[in-house]
Image (cartoon, rainbow, N blue to C red):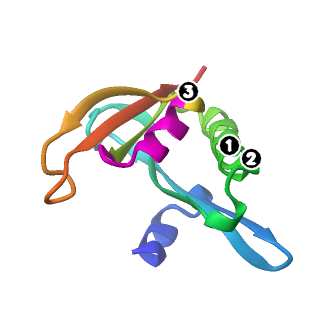
């Protein structure tokens, strides 16, 4: 899946490494009118992860801030994501970096609902 996303959207890949070891990454799609919000000019955060040994060091926040900077340069107005309702740590992180919950999608993950969260870009 990552390879296919890279082929269609290379500018949306972010990697953080420490001494040649990947410790975090993010994938963002620049959308053309699809997704839950059905709006043009949006970015969709597909995935973000930081190695547990490197969490709480600002890596995730720096990834988000870098994405937001690039999204502004691309003249996009919003970023959205889906997150498992049970993933309280991720929901809290997204809230900390400025995302707001706007809806719930029942069964998005098969047996679990997803929160849809957005952040407007100014």
The residue identified by callout 3 is: 98
Q: Position of residue 111 (x, y in %)?
A: 14, 58
Instruction: Count all numbered tags in the image, as a single digit.
Output: 3
Q: Nearer the viewer, residue 3 or 89?
A: 89
Which SS does the magenta portion mostly show? helix
Q: Which of marks 2 and 3 is in front?
A: 2
Q: Nearer the viewer, residue 88 or 120?
A: 88
Furthest residue to the top?
122
Q: Are marks 2 and 1 in contact (CB under 8 Å)?
A: yes
The Cα atoms of the two marked residues, 2 and 1, are separated by 5 Å
Q: Does the magenta stretch include residue 88?
A: yes
Q: Position of residue 113 (x, y in %)?
A: 20, 46
Q: Where is residue 114 in the image (x, y as percent from the top left)?
A: 26, 44
Say the numbered circle drawn on residue 58.
2
Q: What stretch is highlighted in magenta?
A: 84-95
Q: Nearer the viewer, residue 10 or 58?
A: 58
Q: Quadrant of residue 122?
A: top right
In the rendered structure, which disc, 3 or 1, sits on the residue that comes first in sequence?
1
Say the numbered circle drawn on residue 46.
none
Badge 3, how many Cα within 10 Å: few under 14, some, many 20+? few
Q: Do the residues labelled 3 and 1 touch (CB within 8 Å)?
A: no
Q: Is residue 96 above or below residue 90?
A: above
The residue identified by callout 1 is: 61
Q: Where is residue 103 in the image (x, y as percent from the top left)?
A: 25, 29
The Cα atoms of the two marked residues, 2 and 3, are separated by 15 Å
**Image side of residue 114 versus residue 16, left or right:** left
Q: Is residue 4 above or below residue 98?
A: below
SS for callout 1: helix
SS for callout 3: loop
In the rendered structure, which disc, 2 or 3, sits on the residue that comes first in sequence?
2
Badge 2, how many Cα within 10 Å: few under 14, some, many 20+? few
The Cα atoms of the two marked residues, 3 and 1, are separated by 10 Å
């Amino acid at each position: 899946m990552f390879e296919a996303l890279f082929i269609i959207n290379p500018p949306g890949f972010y990697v953080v490494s420490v001494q040649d070891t990947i410790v975090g990454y993010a994938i963002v799609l620049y959308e053309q009118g699809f997704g839950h919000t059905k709006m043009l000019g949006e970015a969709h955060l597909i995935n973000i992860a930081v190695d547990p040994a490197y969490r709480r060091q600002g890596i995730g926040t720096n990834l988000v801030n870098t994405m937001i900077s690039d999204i502004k340069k691309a003249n996009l107005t919003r970023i959205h994501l889906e997150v498992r309702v049970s993933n309280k740590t991720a929901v809290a992180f997204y809230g900390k970096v400025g995302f707001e919950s706007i809806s719930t999608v029942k069964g998005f993950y098969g047996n679990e609902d997803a929160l849809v969260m957005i952040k407007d870009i100014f």
